[in-house]
Image (cartoon, grey):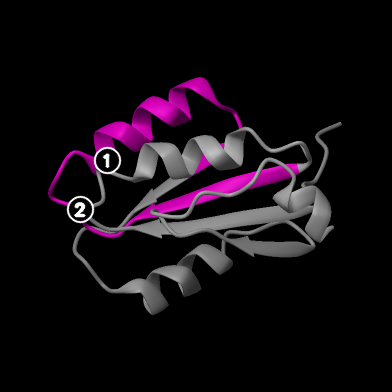
Amino acid sequence: MIKTPMVSVIMSVYNDEENVANSIKSILNQTYSNYEFIIMDDGSIDETWKILKTFQTNSNKIKLLKNKKNIGLTRSLNKLLAETQGDYIARQDSDDLSLRGRIESQI
């Protein structure tokens, strides 16, 4: 039986190859483990997609989506929300760093 995540962490990223890896690591290193991490590449033209794919390969928590062209943060977040399964939503920007106990504390 597959456990439904309690929390859905959503992040939209656009051309942020410099920061996105550290942002992702800060979510993957959380003390709370019952979450899914859904990331939207909003039409990046830098190395962002390549970085995202590397993390997805190494984590079963990550689900990736990609817009063919940049549609902006609000529309991307709405698309991400449609993909969530968790009871709670946590937002993460591609330049955010979350403390290890962030999700656990918020739950």
Disc 1 is placed on an element classified as helix
Relative to the observer, which residue lies in front, 53 or 31? 31
Which amino acid lies under the numbered mark 1 shown in the image of this protein?
Trp
CB atoms of marks 2 and 1 within 8 Å: yes
Q: Quadrant of residue 8?
A: bottom right
Q: Upstream in the sequence, badge 2 or badge 1? A: 2
Q: Position of residue 6 (x, y in %)?
A: 81, 52
The residue labelled by disc 2 is: 44
Residue at the image position 47 percent from the left and 57 percent from the top: 11
Q: Position of residue 83 (x, y in %)?
A: 57, 59
Residue 47 versus residue 82 in the image, above or below: above
| Residue 51 on the magenta segment | yes
Query: Seen in the image, is 18 located left or right of residue 46?
Result: right
Which amino acid lies under the numbered mark 2 shown in the image of this protein?
Ser
Query: Seen in the image, is 106 located left or right of residue 77?
Result: right
* Label 1 Cα neighbours within 10 Å, binned few <14 / some 14-19 / many ≥20: many
Quadrant in the picture for the C terminus: bottom right
Query: Seen in the image, is 61 located left or right of residue 69?
Result: right
Query: Seen in the image, is 44 located left or right of residue 106?
Result: left
The magenta span reads: 35-63
